[in-house]
Amino acid sequence: MDTEHSVSGTVFYTFVSTLLRRTTMDTGFERGTRTIFMNFFLSMAAQKGLIGITLVCHWMVPLYDTELDHHAAQRAIDFMFMEPLTTGEYPSSMRSLVGSRLPKFSIHQSNLVRGSFDFIGLNYYTANYATDAPQLRDANPSFMTDFLVNLTTKRNGKPIGPKAFSNWLFVYPQGILELLLYTKAKYNNPMIYITENGIDEFNDPTLSLDEALNDTNRIDYYFSHLYNIQTAIKDGVNVKGYFAWSLIDNFEWIKGYTSRYIIRFPIIYN
């Protein structure tokens, strides 16, 4: 979930539903390419390949220990698009709040979308506090307002965890454990790969190589998250792999090379 950008109140849902529906090969384009896909799937089966989908998931913590905020945190999780893949339909909260702007699957499409994956990829970096926000009913329809939740990184002025360089990323390693246990319980313990997990820092050109290599914040981040993943595995979560973000830097959205997720030094940018 990209908490920094508002998305159209209709287009986003249409896009996601179409993306999910393509697995049914039920439109003219998909019917015309069915043979290509079937040949691909047969080849994949012969090679014992797997197909999955990756979801961007922030864990949601109730801002206050109230029934309203617990429901708010659940609604925020509902809008992460996992449920259609496992039940063939959107959560009741989404259907109720989004209404006619949320496309509906036909019975045929629902049956095909349900369980249409071999594994689930989860991108996890951080967590947010969630609080009930009924006033958002009066806001312009948007993916970021429809669930009637305000997301924040602070409770009573205290951050949910240590802040990274990116203004949305706060270190909350227990969130990956909660996310994995929730996915196991809610979605029948699917095969899971952690497809992204990492922390960024400011690309400080004044640091010497020795100072840059003294990277205790990143070491602590990976240690604490891997420890919580190990705990989840011991609790029966079907985690099969883990990918750190990232081996090398990339041009990080609007931050460019000022934001570094790299786990290998030195790489110098002129």
Image (cartoon, rainbow, N blue to C red):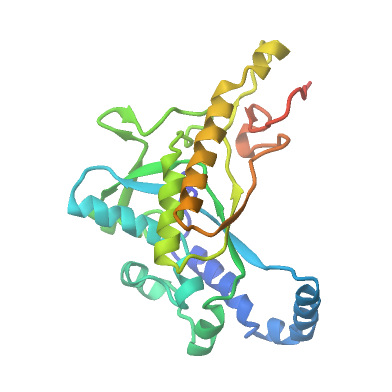
Q: Position of residue 131 (x, y in %)?
A: 27, 47
Foreground residue among 173 and 260: 173
* Residue drawn at x 58%, y 31% as measured from the top left: 200
User: Residue 26, image x and y in percent?
Assistant: 62, 85
Closer to the camera in the image, 4 or 200: 200
Q: Residue at x 41, y 54 (%)?
A: 144
Where's residue 239, x and y in %? Answer: 56, 56
Residue 59, percent from left and from top: 41, 48
Is 77 in front, or is 269?
A: 77
Q: Which residue lies furthest to the front in this view?
A: 234
When asked about the image quadrant of residue 67, the answer is bottom left
- 31 horizontally vs 134: left or right: right
Residue found at x 28% / y 28%: 157
Q: Which residue is at the far left?
A: 66
Q: Viewed as shown, does residue 77 lie left or right of 15?
A: left
- Count of numbered badges drawn on the protein: 0
Q: Nearer the viewer, residue 163 or 232?
A: 232
Please tell me in which quadrant of the rendered image residue 155 appears: top left
187 left or right of 64 in image: right
Q: In this view, does 131 lie above or below 78?
A: above
Q: Please identify the quadrant where the C terminus is shown.
A: top right
Residue drawn at the location 58% of the way across and 38% of the way down: 198
Question: 96 above or below 204?
Answer: below
Q: In this view, does 51 lie above or below 113?
A: above
Q: Can residue 167 be seen in this view?
A: yes
Q: In this rendering, is residue 270 above or below 152?
A: above
Q: Evaluate whether residue 147 shows in this view.
A: no
Q: Give residue 182's quadrant in the image.
A: bottom left
